[in-house]
Image (cartoon, coloured by chain):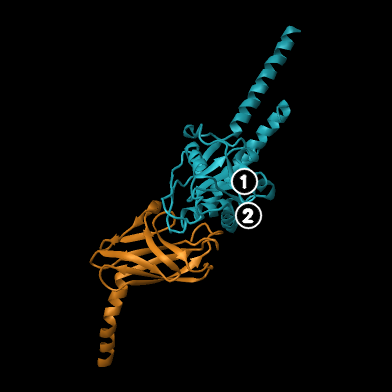
Amino acid sequence: MKRWILVVLCLLPVWVQAEEVEVRDAWVRLPPPVADTAAAYLRLINHGGRELVLLGVRANVAGEAMFHGPGMRPLGTVRIPAGGEYRFAPGAAHVMLMKLKQPLHAGDSVHLVLRRAKGKPIQVELPVRDMRRLERP
Amino acid sequence: MWRGAMWVVVMLALSVGALTCFIQHTEPDVPAYLRGMGGDFTLRSAHGPVSLHDFRGKVGLLYFGYTHCPDACPMALSVIARALRGMSAAQRDRVYALFVSVDPKRDTPEHLQAYTAFFDRRIIGLTGTTRQLTALAVKYRMDFEVPQAPADAAYTVRHSRFIYLLDAEGRVVALFDEKTPSARLRRALRRWLYAASVRRMWKDTQGERR
């Protein structure tokens, strides 16, 4: 019994950390093989009690990555208030992946690291989706 | 005798009037703000020069963008590709789609062709000199901004996101964008195809056809 309580206590910080920021609807649009850019989309929900400030992003498949607001405007930081959310969604804000290291394929997995002002970076796995025949992701 | 002739003339005038009215109404309404927008142009494709007037008699889609565009352009080209795919072969033969790159520094006609073929082989990639593209942007009332950067820099281009629908005379008759459902775009294409065939039949009967 005592041992179980110990295990739960040890896991508690991990659980709290994981629950603070929820990531949903994460995916990458499959670009044409000749393109060296791609857009990543995700919804970030801040369940924490403090504002979440994202300072930057890295992607394993891209030489460079950055946040883009609607109209291709680069965003230096992304601020998500406590209890709020931010959507990177088609036709609006997106994570721009530049200088792709190799052509992507449908079904590939892309790893994003979102750097926070405070706390551990957020790690996200995003599937690559071929949207040529789909009306919606 | 006179009365009979009068009747014939009146009936004839009425039926011509009705027919003209019918033909005019097969063409969907064009919003006033689109009048005078657009116009002919000649740009470069991977297979040589292409002019808008080459497509006279066909209904077209036109989109301005660039190939390093990760979001709006692939969305627009996917919508166009899906709209085309849902049409019959006979309808598709009378429809064309043009993707004009406003980033000629990086987008060669060959690169453009490889890019558009990913979405649909029927989409023709075009570009021109900065001067040609600026003149075209004025005609089509679109904005674009290519930063002063070397071609190998990872820059982004801001641009308007309209999908222009062009009638059989090459006039801009409707605007859509990358968020338009492909079924809506396809419906609009079909309506304008129908309008074009009615107009052609009418011209045939009038002997006006070139």
Disc 2 marks which amino acid? Arg
Answer yes or no: is residue A15 visible. yes
Identify the residue shown where x is 67% and y is 18%.
Answer: B13
Residue B104 placement, left or right of B20: left
Q: Are marks 1 and 2 on the same chain?
A: yes
Chain to which the residue tagged by mark 1 belongs: B
Disc 1 marks which amino acid? Tyr
Vertical relation: B176 (above or below) B75? above
Identify the residue shown where x is 57% and y is 36%.
Answer: B40
Residue B173 at x, y percent in the picture: 54, 37
Residue B143 at x, y percent in the picture: 44, 43
Question: Which residue corresponds to mark 1?
Answer: B96
Residue A86 at x, y percent in the picture: 34, 60
Q: Nearer the viewer, residue B81 or B122?
A: B122
Which chain gets the cyan colouring? B
Question: Which residue corresponds to mark 2?
Answer: B121
Residue B114 placement, left or right of B180: right
Q: Nearer the viewer, residue B153 or A29?
A: B153
How many callouts does the rendering have? 2
Dot 2: element: loop
Q: Quadrant of the C terminus of chain B?
A: top right
